[in-house]
Image (cartoon, rainbow, N blue to C red):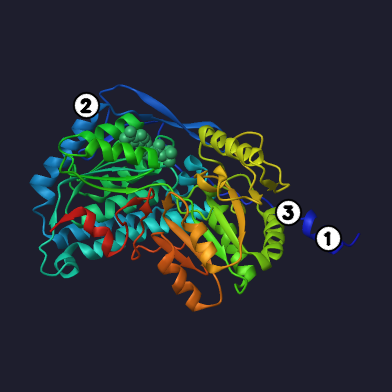
Amino acid sequence: MKEATSNEFFTDWKYAPAPESTDHIKLNKQYDLFINGKFVKPTSKKYFDTINPATEQKLAEVAEANEKDVDLAVTSAKNAYDKVWKKMPAKERSKYIFRIARLMQERAREFAVIESMNGGKPIRESRDVDTPLAANHFFYYAGWADKLDYAFPNKKPQSLGVAGQIIPWNFPLLMAAWKIAPALATGNTVVLKPAETTPLTALKLAELIRDSGLPDGVVNIITGFGKTGAAIVNHPKINKVAFTGSTDVGKLIQKSIAGTNKKVTLELGGKAANIIFDDAPIDQAVEGIINGIFFNQGHVCCAGSRLFIQENVADIVIGKLKQRLETLIVGDPLDKNTDIGAINSKEQLTKINDFIKIGIDEGAEMYQSSCSIPSKGFFCKPTLFLHTSQSHRIVQEEIFGPVLAIQTFRTVEEVIEKANNIPYGLSAGVWTDKGSKIFNLTSKLRAGVVWANTYNKFDPASPFGGYKESGFGREGGLHGLMPYLSF
Ligand code: ADP
């Protein structure tokens, strides 16, 4: 047998496929609206297809809620609030939230597989990040439910009523948990709408909530498009709007509730700066950058989509990034080896490809992995743009895909100025050996979250949210209770 040279060794081997089984997954052909503890047919009589973005195959049909359906859901949430949930002792509410968390843990595998099938994210992410974090949010807020007086001493926290919650497609189950868990813990009831391309784990969550015995109407989950979302926002019986999604829709929501008593939190777009100093642990930083923008296809509002490298280590870092890019596995989201799964929808893939073209036209140097991508489904090669400048659109605008715009810098002042020179302010990353530099930057970067020598780390106890066009309000932690309370 011929012995491989070291070069061949790095280029010739492949992992054997390790696909997660879908045998245990039960999906209905058709899903109705979850209103008042039951699945009910939409009065609209309309359904739309939801697909697997990795295969383009239809997974199920999902109900499209119209204004009448929204009214039924909101009315059911209002009745449940007035008659049951608001009156229930907090420690009893806590038990229900705890039960939801336990059931989610028991069904974790099912949730993870459906998340990957419907959303396109690698099973490693949905299994190790999305699903456990979602369960942890319910556990965490179950703990707060009967301790609100302790959390806000002398303030007499009161629930608000019905929360209308609208979530995007990048973390369907996790965003549902971020929204529902604090709302329930603070004594509010819920009408939640998942994104039109990723309704299935939210509908599975509806089944779980039904099985948990949560009183009817406390959580209602309805599906539809932007019009359904707008009908929730504008319904007069909604007391609180919680939205995660695009900055454009966030602005629309803010306009439409202006002059009402509705409280609102908006978690919108981002264009995070990941900053590497010359004293950083370079290999760890490279791995952090890769994780920050390429895992989960860049479908993360806090993705580290801008990279600033201190000039004297730029060649080393870029060389290592290119090498690492070559080893990333793009393909079947259900394969446990996959690093980059499917782009969530055809529209999103078109948007990403348009931005890649814009980057080339703007004169930035593009570098892509030489990997092949599946012919069916929506896939995008991990892409670097070198020699970008602040004025480039690929530097200023959110792409929401596996595309990294790279710049260099010389001084701390320069990189702070460049990192902040953007309409967004959701998150940032700093890589350096010096604690003093970390503290200097964390106080000057206008970003809601700044990670130091790590990236994309989440914990239910830690608040998350933005500045500027990235929105306002915090989710997670003690801070995440506040938007659902009046004092
Ligand atoms: P993205 O660009 O990430 O898809 P969107 O802001 O378009 O983000 O969508 C996020 C969520 O907001 C989805 O559930 C979507 O259906 C909903 N949505 C879209 N338009 C509106 C609107 N005008 N009012 C309320 N919700 C909306």
Which comes before the other along the chain, label 3 or label 1?
1
Question: Image quadrant of ligand 1?
Answer: top left
Rounded to the nearest angstrom, the CA distance separating label 1 from label 2 is 64 Å
Residue at mark 3: 14
Which comes before the other along the chain, label 1 or label 2?
1
Can residue 323 be seen? yes
Q: Is mark 1 within 8 Å of ligand 1?
A: no
Rounded to the nearest angstrom, the CA distance separating label 3 from label 1 is 14 Å
Residue at mark 2: 68
Q: Amino acid at mark 1?
A: Asn
Rounded to the nearest angstrom, the CA distance separating label 2 from label 3 is 54 Å
Label 2 element class: helix
Q: Tag on residue 7?
A: 1
- Asked whether 401 or 389 is in front, the reply is 389
Q: Is residue 413 above or below residue 205?
A: below
At x 53% / y 78%, what residue is drawn?
434
Label 1 element class: helix
At x 33% / y 53%, what residue is drawn?
178
